[in-house]
Image (cartoon, rainbow, N blue to C red):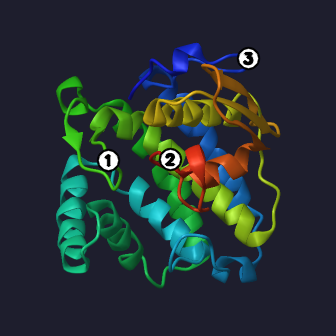
Amino acid sequence: MTTTMATTMTSTAMRRLGRDDMTATATVEYARMLRLLRSLDAADWSKPTDCDEWDVRAVVAHLVGTVESSTFREQVRVARAGSKVAKRRGRPQVDGINEIHVRERDGVAPAALLARLEAAAPAFIRFRARVPALLRRVKMPTPLSRKLSVGELVDLIYTRDVWIHRADICTATHREMELTRDHDGRIVADVVAEWAGAHQQPFTLELDGPAGGSFAVGDGGPSMRLDANEFCRFVSGRTHGDGLLATQVLF
């Protein structure tokens, strides 16, 4: 990731999240996701989300598929199967992997999905922590204009994915998202830092809410003020953005 722009951020800007933060951040994020899922009514699981073709149950099936891939053998199997699906559909590999996750858990009841997520998440976090240094440097293609290292995937993107899907489920079920400055604020600040490095333009950004903060790079750029969750929905591609908000980062 580009970090030059991030170092000039002001106010609530924080150091980039990395390997040393992964276990604690991922553990909190899965705990918050599980609390949210336990609060859902039966009807909530079939509500549509902002993820194309996925209702709440499918989003959770995808998350379960991710955490149940906690061995290198399973990672390779799913990647190969996902690549075939993606090639047939002319889509990025990650879309094919996600489809495999959901398809292989089709028909699994919500209660069972919740139980499987709770059971598998700790082992998946341990698996991420054990990825060796040589493998962490391997680069993978992404739907965006840059490659992603395995280290970035295991340290950042897997946790961001859970976070943004928690926001998806809250939006779909009209629930307030559990947010705190020390956890969600750091995730959002890391997203801002990557976004700033991606577009390399001056800006002033005020993000409201518990996960928000004040950020500025350079002089003469646009000034923006919006909710922190809304900002992440723009830069994740869930909402169409104009200007700098059209720059997307990986989730």
Left or right: 66 with respect to 173? left
Left or right: 38 with respect to 244? right
Q: Is the residue marked by circle 1 packed among few (<14), some (14-19), or many (20+) residues within 10 Å?
A: few
Where is 195 relative to 100, above or below?
above
Q: CA distance from mark 1 to mark 3?
A: 30 Å
Cβ–Cβ under 8 Å for marks 1 and 2? no
**Amino acid type, residue under disc 1 in the picture:** Ser
Does the rendering let one see residue 106? yes
The percent position of residue 84, horizontal first and vertical second, equals: 17, 72
Q: Considering only order in the chain, which callout, 3 or 1, is on the residue closer to the N terminus?
A: 3
Question: In the rendered image, which residue does mark 3 sit on?
Answer: 11
Q: Which mark is residue 51?
A: none
Query: What element does badge 2 sit on?
Result: loop
The percent position of residue 61, horizontal first and vertical second, equals: 48, 69
**Amino acid type, residue under disc 3 in the picture:** Ser
The percent position of residue 8, horizontal first and vertical second, equals: 57, 14
**Amino acid type, residue under disc 2 in the picture:** Thr
Question: In the rendered image, which residue does mark 1 sit on?
Answer: 145
Q: Is the residue marked by circle 3 packed among few (<14), some (14-19), or many (20+) residues within 10 Å?
A: few
Query: What element does badge 3 sit on?
Result: loop
Q: Which mark is residue 247?
A: 2
Q: CA distance from mark 2 to mark 3?
A: 22 Å
